[in-house]
Amino acid sequence: MRVGSLLARRAALAVLTLWLLSLMVFAGGQLLPGDVARAILGPLADARAVANLDHQLGLDRPLLVQYWDWISRFVTGDMSQSYAYHAPVAPFVWRALGASLKLGTLAFGLVVPLGIAGGVWAALHAGRALDRVLSIGGLVAASLPEFVTGIVLILVFGIWLRLLPVAADWPPGAGPLTQVRYLLLPSLSLALVLFGYLARMARAGTIEVLKADFTRTAVLKGLQPRRVLWHHVLRNALLPTITVIATQTGYLLGGLVIVETLFRYPGIGTLIYAAARDKDFPMLEAGVLLVGVIYTLSALAADLLYAALNPRIALGGAE
Amino acid sequence: MKGRWHLLLRSGAFVSGLLIILFWALCALVGRLFAPFDPFAADVLSTLSPPSTMHWFGTDQLGRDVLSRVIVGSRDVLEVAPLATALGLALGVLLGLTTGYFRGIFDEAVSRIIDAVLALPLVIIALLALSALGASSVTVIVVVGCIFTPLIARTVRAAVLAERELEYVAAARLRNESTLRILLGEILPNIMPPVLVEGTVRLGYAIFAVASLSFLGFGIQPPSPDWGLAVSESYGLINGGIWWPALFNTLAISSLIVAVNLTADGLQATADA
């Protein structure tokens, strides 16, 4: 019962957040530019041409009508027409999202095990030199913008060592392994930012659990250290890390814009960037809103997963 | 307060971070005086020449000296990022104070809006707003400042929630002090440490965001020698083996961001102590 009401409450909040988000995105794409047609045609265009285009795009209707038209169609998967391509937005967005999913999955697949292993390892050797190196390295990696790490990686692995391709544009028909090879540098640049956060969380969680009474009991009752680590320490230490992974999805999505642009990879980040550059507002709104939807849903999933894994939260109810 | 300063000055992270920031601030202010070349002077006869004894960091595609441009390249980001942070702090503190103190439906509504803003990565909302408003230093300050407002408001609100229950606030109310005085004269001074830490952390994010936006072409505009902009103009050349403009500007950004984070870490450790 408790879990059910928690679920309902979180889901209702997520819907509310998404509605506010859609208002924000609509305001960004349709109100901020002032006159959209003027923004597209430029300051020298004839006033009649501007009015014509406004009418053609349906921008001379009341704002509420425009919002309702936009959002009701968005919910059914119709994302209206792109200004730049004169074609429906949806196919572009889904294709780009698929490409980004590939990149994001590889990035998560690399960083989650590495970050957790690094953090736990640092906690077990807390205070030693390598722990400090890992902590400082993680801090630096976490604070640098993706294009900075990306360029350093390109220079080291792509240009000087000539180990990996510097752009994510594989030849057509390339197999999965070749694709991974091409995606290695972009996903590393995406993931390094997360590595620092994850390692820090995992380290802090492990250190806290190592000090806990139940760990001492486990050691004192003669359990093998390996068993204590896997069954007692990790299970408890990694709980907060799950939340971090979910909230970091947002950072990952933001990083996509930079990394995909840097590596010329046709994902959702490149789509948003190109739409922003070309003032293709329907494309831009669809891309941005979709990123918000993905983020909100993954945050919701993380909340529920956390509640499911941690009996204290589900039983305690409330925040 | 004196004890705090003492603690801060003994923190290696804080001092080294502050020294690097001061170095770049000095370069921003008077870098033109000791830069070996004019950072804006193009030289068509020596474009893209690699690092040499004459041009330590080489020259860029217009033949401008990269070292000189790196030296003065901190100017715009050190103007835009602190102003954006200051705007976010001013609005965020105001919003956090009022929502935390009055609670109620206003607080609830603002919290939901904050959740919605947080559902989008900063760079993506900023792209949306900047493509609508047009990119310039001023719009970047306004957009980043506005995005920071709810984030800062949340921290301030949490601090106010704890403070408002304390006796000195009740005493001020009994003395019949005006609400404005209670908020700004009583509560605000008491929440300064977390506000300062939040401000420094945000400054790091602001530099991160402004550099990223400039890299995308939506931030600081040419012909500024800004580092993010310089990387955006030169990363395409890396494939052709021309690594120097991209690398040296990248290193400069890294040093500034790491320095701000070191300072923030030092401040945080002292505020918690």
Image (cartoon, coloured by chain):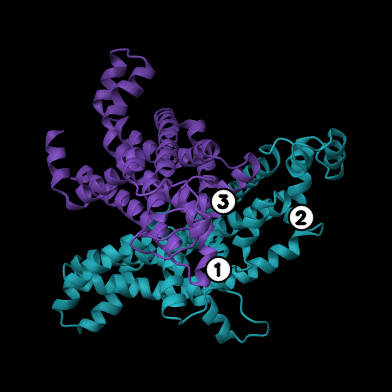
Chain colours: A cyan, B purple
Instruction: State how far apart marks 1 and 2 are (Cα).
Output: 23 Å
Q: Report the side of A165 relative to A220 (left or right).
A: right
Q: Which SS class for mark 3?
A: loop
Numbered mark located on residue A84 in the image: 2
Would you call the spot at circle 1 few (<14 residues within 10 Å), some (14-19), or many (20 or more)?
many
Q: Residue at x 65, y 60 (%)?
A: A271
Q: Amino acid at mark 1?
A: Phe
Name the chain under label 1.
A
Q: Are marks 3 and 2 on the same chain?
A: no
Q: Which residue is nearer to you in this view: B98 or A309?
A: B98
Q: Amino acid at mark 2?
A: Ala
Q: Are marks 1 and 2 in contact (CB under 8 Å)?
A: no
Q: Amino acid at mark 3?
A: Gly
Name the chain under label 2.
A
Name the chain under label 3.
B
Q: Report the side of B168 relative to B122 (left or right).
A: left
Q: Is residue A165 above or below residue B11?
A: below
* Quadrant assignment, res B89: top left
Q: Is residue A171 above or below residue B16?
A: below
Q: Which SS class for mark 1?
A: loop
Q: Residue at x 19, y 69 (%)?
A: A126
